[in-house]
Image (cartoon, rainbow, N blue to C red):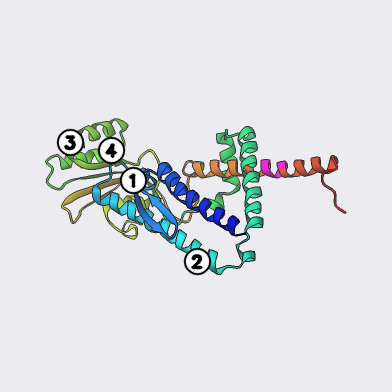
Amino acid sequence: MRLTKCITILALAVILPSCRMINTILHDDTVVARVGSHLLYKSDVLPLIPEEATGEDSLRIAMQYINTWATDLVFLDIAESKLSKQEKDVTSELEAYRRALLKYRYEQLFVNERLDTSVTAEQVEEYYNSHSSDFILERPLVKAVFMKIDKDVANKRAIRAMLSSVDEGDEWEIEALSYPQADRYTSYSGKWVDIASLAKDLGVEYVSIVNVKPGTYLENTDASGKYNAAFVSEIVPKGVPAPVEHCTPEINDIILSVRKHRLTTSLERDLLDDARDKGKFVIY
């Protein structure tokens, strides 16, 4: 017995330094943090820091990661010491998660191989007509053009005149005219936008322009001394369905979502029927 004990002690004396040596070889790196026996190395942190980050940003990102890493391990250590063996047994939860993850991945593969992603204008129109009440506007939609320029710009009057023009060719001219001096030029005339977006451009609350009429020119000078100008060409008031073209992206997503649901439902049903036919699924 004494000989066995001596041999064990000698073996440990050899093994422990070897473990430290192996750890050093595998992690020939600077340790930046430690929680108990857990070590965090510089090489673990560096890949998380963008190359373009400043010294201050690099330090902030590194410290954020280190604190998160330490928090997780502090919780792990206290949980390991305080929870019972039964409470620490997560075998069933891991197996349930594994099954759910594999099921999800196969469903994604099945759907991706079979999903028809083409949605016609007729299908969009049909859905819109059947569900128009789902697209009632809470705020008006507008078509508009917006510009932010210096308040003392010399050709303000010409820009104002062109903003209110409905001639598509004038949009190219106004962009060319304003480009050297405009902080921003945005044309919404080709699509409907929430009036709140236009209000944000103007730096005002949307309620202050909610009753604006088509053909209205809006302007103000903000706190920074910039001249904000917008021309509203068309409006859809709140309380009515949004135009179908505004709803088209959302309707496309809805139609595809319904198709995905049908595919996964049919997959579940077919797999269950097949298992039952082959005797793999039996209810006693």
Identify residue for label 3.
180
In the rendered structure, the answer to whether residue 12 lies left or right of residue 97 reads left
Q: Which residue is mark 4?
A: 165
User: In the image, which disc is placed on residue 80?
Assistant: none
Q: Which residue is mark 1?
A: 49
Where is residue 278? Give x, y as percent: 84, 39
Of residue 83 and residue 93, the one placed in the foreground of this image is 83
| Helix, strand or loop at mark 3 | loop
Q: Give the distance between the C-alpha atoms of the residues marked 1 and 3, in whole angstroms.
A: 37 Å
Q: Earlier in the sequence, mark 3 or mark 4?
A: 4
The amino acid on which the numbered mark 2 sits, given as a three-letter code, is Ile
Return the disc, 2 or 4, that comes first in the chain's sequence. Answer: 2
Instruction: Specify the principal SS of the magenta part.
Output: helix
**Crowd rating for badge 2 (residues with CA inside 10 Å; few <14, some 14–19, many 20+):** few
Q: Residue at x 19, y 49 (%)?
A: 227
> In the image, 230: left or right of 9?
left
**Point 82% across, 46% down: residue:** 281
Seen in the image, is 224 located left or right of residue 123? left
Which residue lies under the disc numbered 2? 78
Q: Position of residue 63 (x, y in %)?
A: 33, 55
